[in-house]
C-alpha cells in the first residue's frame, strides 16, 4: 500500500518497498515487521484496520515501544488510501468489538 501513496514517491523515490524484514510468528497469526525508517513505521501504524484476505489487520508497535507517542516520527499522509477504500475511514480499533484475525507489529 505504501507505493499507492503520492508522498511515498516524493520522499522515497529510490525505494521500492517500505519493509526491510518480516518475521512471522505463531504460525502466521502475527508478524514483526521492520521498516526502513521511523516515518515509514509510523505510517504503517496509521494503516491499522486494513483488510487482508477478508480479515481486518491490526497494526501496532511492539509492546516494549507502546505508550506515549512522544518522539515517534509523523507518518506519511494515508488519506489517499482511505479515499481509495484501501483503509477504513475510521482510524484504529477504538469502539470496535471485532477481534483482529491478524496482527502486524511495526
Image: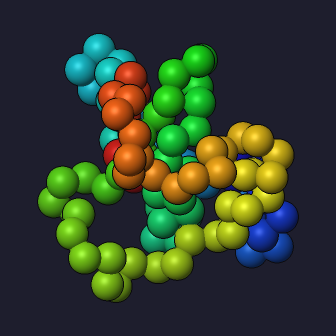
> Is any part of residue 23 visible from this angle?
no
Q: Nearer the viewer, residue 48 or 61?
A: 48
Q: Nearer the viewer, residue 9 or 50?
A: 50
Please count the marks in the image: 0
Quick check: 13 left or right of 51?
right
**Residue at 52% over, 78% down:** 74
Q: How is the image coloured?
A: rainbow
Quick check: 81 left or right of 89?
right
Quick check: 80 left or right of 45?
right
Check the picture and name the quadrant holding the N terminus: top right
Q: Nearer the viewer, residue 84 or 76?
A: 84
> Is any part of residue 94 visible from this angle?
yes
**Residue at 57% over, 53% down:** 90
Looking at the image, residue 18 lies above or below residue 55: below
- Image coordinates of residue 15 in percent, x first then y, are 72, 59
Q: Residue furthest left?
A: 64
- Image coordinates of residue 51 in percent, x first then y, are 59, 30
- Image coordinates of residue 101 in percent, x first then y, are 38, 23
Looking at the image, residue 103 lies above or below residue 54: below
Looking at the image, residue 92 lies above or below residue 7: above
**Residue at 29% over, 14% down:** 27
Quick check: 5 left or right of 55?
right
**Residue at 58% over, 26% down:** 52
- Image coordinates of residue 78 in percent, x first then y, are 68, 61
Q: Nearer the viewer, residue 54 or 33?
A: 54
Amino acid at each position: 500500500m505504501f507505493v499507492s501513496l503520492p508522498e511515498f514517491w516524493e520522499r522515497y523515490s529510490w525505494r521500492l518497498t517500505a519493509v526491510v524484514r518480516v518475521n512471522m510468528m505463531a504460525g502466521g497469526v502475527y508478524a514483526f515487521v521492520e521498516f526502513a525508517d521511523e516515518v515509514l513505521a509510523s505510517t504503517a501504524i496509521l494503516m491499522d484496520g486494513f483488510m487482508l484476505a477478508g480479515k481486518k489487520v491490526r497494526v501496532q508497535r511492539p509492546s516494549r515501544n507502546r505508550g506515549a507517542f512522544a518522539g515517534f516520527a509523523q507518518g506519511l499522509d494515508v488519506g489517499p488510501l482511505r479515499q481509495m477504500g484501501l483503509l477504513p475511514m475510521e482510524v484504529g480499533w477504538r469502539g470496535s468489538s471485532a477481534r483482529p484475525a491478524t496482527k502486524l507489529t511495526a
